[in-house]
Image (cartoon, rainbow, N blue to C red):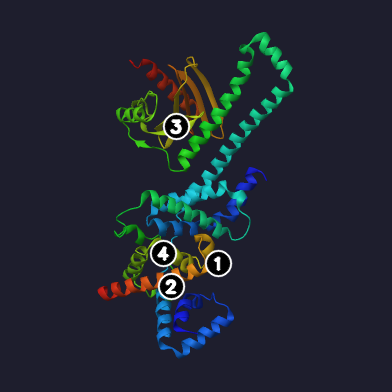
Amino acid sequence: MSCDLTQRFIPGYMDGELDLVRTIEMETHLKDCPACAHKLEDQQGVRAVLRRSSLAYVAPAVLRDRIQSSLRASAKADVEVRESGIQWRSLRVFRWAGAVAVFVLFSLSGWQLTAPLREPSTDQRIAADVFSSHVRSLEANHLMDVVSTDQHTVKPWFDAKLDFSPPVEDLASNGFPLVGGRLDYLEGREVAALIYQRRNHFINVFVWPDSNETNSTQSVKSRQGYSIMRWSRDGFQCWAVSDIGGSELAEFVRLLENYTSSEPN
Amino acid sequence: MSDTERRERFEQTVLPHLDAAYNLARWLTRNDQDAQDVAQEACLRAFRFFDRYQGGSARAWLLTIVRNTCYTWLHKNRHSDSTEFDEEIHSSEVCGSTDPEVQALTAAEKETVNHALEDLPDVFREALVLREMEGMSYREIADVTSVSLGTVMSRLARARTRLRHSLTVEFSRRF
């Protein structure tokens, strides 16, 4: 075996990765060649130092906890999305099966009758998406694109990024400080996500324009320890989601509604 | 498989390798907070694609995802001050050992080795981390880093040579 080849196989030799034949060839050569033997010693020396330094890091316990709770939350979010998907599919099946009946309903009573049927499932789908977005924003460490407690920083930031200007209010004096904003994606469009804080909890508020909406507030829905609320104000559809209690979220939404409607422009 | 079963299976199969995941992320990002973020993102990604895991070494499978996540992250956040001394590296989170052999290196020497390893190019550093800290076979390293066995061997050779060189320089300067 040549010196060239021997030196090329030194790592494999010392790591025990060579086959028997090559190992014997290596040993024969190393016995008679001080230069190659010296190279091997060098490499073994580095490995020994590295191993003796025991530089491996251990994952912090908080990381393990965080991952486990994210797994639980994300499994739930996936279930939510899947469930709402099933509802859509079964609704479609129903429509095909009862096409004639539906046609009759349409012609007799127009949208009034089908609109209430359509509403809950759209809302459920958005609620599932809002819930997933909230969970992901916390788990992926992507809560905020713009970090600021100043509504006069957050609002212009959104104005530059979106084709609408979302209402941005700071509720710090009421115990719900604004902490930042983020762009998110819901209902096939970019939406504004405003992040508020309540003690150690975060509230995501999703806002996008919806001209069909009339001013209304929907009561709190609860999903696996998260509260979700939907309301409409001044041509915007708004959703709030958080793991704070339902009554606190309702209070938060009430404050936000009052602010939004009292805004001069 | 129900969602609970799926999550439990993931927690039993993949999560035991979280230390390895964090260690690789820590050495590639060279920073605790970023390593935590990357390790977490990689674990959640692994969970999302858990259906694609087809048995075999769960650690190698997870580390492949960690590595990809790391490189995506590095691509976005490449720090220019990579040689800057990072105090956190030498904090208590570095795994201690009671083996008297291991104790032979002083804290200052460890620090030097740590620094020298951090200064290696990513591909050499990851090869050494996988081999010396995770004890992976060449086959596993080849799978995780998507290169041939020959490349694994030559990277390890070059990594050790470089490390030896910088340690020689450092040790002769310090001691």
Q: Chain of mark 1?
A: B
Q: Identify the residue shown where x is 49% and y is 60%.
A: B145
Q: Nearer the viewer, mark 4 or mark 3?
A: 4
Q: How many marks?
A: 4
Instruction: Give the class, few, some or many, for how many residues have Cα within 10 Å of label 2's Cα (few <14, many ≥20).
Output: many
Q: Position of residue A160 (x, y in %)?
A: 34, 29
CA–CA distance between discs 1 and 4?
17 Å
Distance in Å between CA atoms under marks 4 and 2: 12 Å
The residue indicated by pointer 3 is A204
Asked whether, in this view, residue A232 is left or right of residue A72, the answer is: left
State yes or no: discs 4 and 3 in contact (Cβ < 8 Å). Answer: no
A142 to A14, vertically: above or below? above
Can you identify the residue that label 2 sits on? B157
Tell me the CA gap for discs 4 and 3: 40 Å
- Under mark 1, the amino acid is Arg
Tag of residue B125? 4
Subunit under mark 3 = A
Distance in Å between CA atoms under marks 2 and 1: 16 Å
Assign a secondary structure to mark 1.
helix
Q: Can residue A160 be spotted in the picture?
A: yes
Per the rendering, the mark at residue B139 is 1
Residue that appears at 37% across and 57% down: B30
